[in-house]
Each structure stands twice: as C-alpha cells, then as structure tokens.
Image (spheres, rainbow, N blue to C red):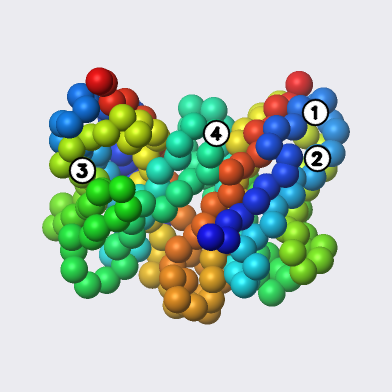
Amino acid sequence: AQSVTQLGSHVSVSEGALVLLRCNYSSSVPPYLFWYVQYPNQGLQLLLKYTTGATLVKGINGFEAEFKKSETSVHLTKPSAHMSDAAEYFCAVSDRVWAGGAGNMLTFGGGTRLMVKP
Amino acid sequence: EPEVTQTPSHQVTQMGQEVILRCVPISNHLYFYWYRQILGQKVEFLVSFYNNEISEKSEIFDDQFSVERPDGSNFTLKIRSTKLEDSAMYFCASRPTGGEWETQYFGPGTRLLVL
C-alpha cells in the first residue's frame, strides 16, 4: 500500500524567502508523483508532476520539485515566496498504470498550509 | 480552459436524508473519480468510474454510496442515508485517455454538512 507524509502541516515564510515543502512517500515501486495547490474556496490545481525522465520538474508559478528515489522524497521548492503563494499544498502519488487502465487512484499526504508574511 | 464543475458548492442536510452531489467532468475525459476530505484530515479516494462501471472503490465506499453517469455530461455521487460522519468536502476529478493521461483534474468541491 502506498502512503504519503508531508512534514509540517503549517509552514510560514517571509515574502521573498525560499519556500521548501517536504514530501516523502512509501511505495513498492516508484509511483507517479504530483503536487497540487488549493487556494481558499477553490479546487485542487495541479502544480507539477513527475512521471519519468528528468528528476527535476518545473511547475507553474515558479515552483519546482526534485524526485529523489533513494530518499523516496519529492520536496517542493520556490526560490522566492510571493504573497499570492499562500495556500494549501498537497503531495500525492499514484500507481504506474497504463493510459487505458481504469485505476491510478491518488493517495494524498495531509497537506501543508503555506503562510507568507509581508 | 476546460474545467471540472461541481454543484452545489455547499449542501446542508439532516441525518438520514439522501443527497446527490453533481459533477460535470471535462468533456473529452472518460475516467472519473470521487474523493472526500473530512475537515482536518487527508483527501481520501472513494471511487473511480470508467465505461459506465466502477473500476475501483475504497473501504469508505460502502452500500450507502453509489455513482452514476445519468447522461453524457453529468457524474453523480449519491449518499442514500447520510450520517454525521459523512460531513466533508467532496471532490470530483476526471482524466483524459491520451496526452496528459496521468493527470486528474479536480473540481472545486461540494462542502456537505450533515446535521
């Protein structure tokens, strides 16, 4: 069974500071990895995903994540926080299924609420 | 840009009542999902649906729950007799068959409160 752990339910940074949100996963085989963001009163929006290839993945809004198989981690970073980055961030994994497979349910971490101080 | 929509955004119901949560997936997507998030807890998978049948379901998805695609655009989640513990945010998601097929696109959610 897969599991996802996000370290820190709340993270607070100053505007302009580095953002680092941590995610570790447990899976019998390397899964697909996703980061979603949820702004207040909105749904889950995909930030980035890792499926194969380059382990450093760039997403939207200046975020990126590095998949480290040896550490089973996919931490999310952004060099300089902006006030608009305040939101809840979710790390998720799914099995490596083929495109026609009906599965690939997502297993989510507990989420990290990012607060950005002026 | 196409998006998943859900109605209603909020629903309050009495314990024991039936509720139907509605979702309109992205039009060319064929795989559909329901997830829920109880306040303060993780987002949890409920069920996946493809080709007019359930593909996978979690332990949460018991006989009180059902899903249906009543027409070419809607995807519904029915809770037959709601319990207090069904209070949660319910998210619908869909994914395509080609292109970005690994990616599930989520709706804004329906917040259900059972009194």
Q: Position of residue A74 (x, y in %)?
A: 23, 51
Report the front residue among B84 and B88.
B88
CA gap between label 4 and label 3 equals 23 Å
Indicate the amino acid at tag 4.
Asn
Query: Separation of disc 4 and disc 2 at Cα?
Result: 21 Å
Mark seen at residue B113:
none
Badges 4 and 1, same chain: no
> Residue beneath label 2, please?
B19
Chain at numbered mark 2:
B
Q: For residue A112, what is the image quadrant?
A: top left
x 39%, y 33%: residue: A87
Give me the residue at 85% from left, 33% from top.
Answer: B17
Tag 3 and tag 1, C-beta contact below 8 Å: no
Q: Are marks 1 and 2 in contact (CB under 8 Å)?
A: yes
Q: Which circle's residue, 4 or 3, is located before the other in the chain?
A: 4
Name the residue type under label 2. Answer: Val
Residue A105 appears in the figure:
no
Q: Which residue is mark 3?
A: A78
Residue underneath mark 1: B13
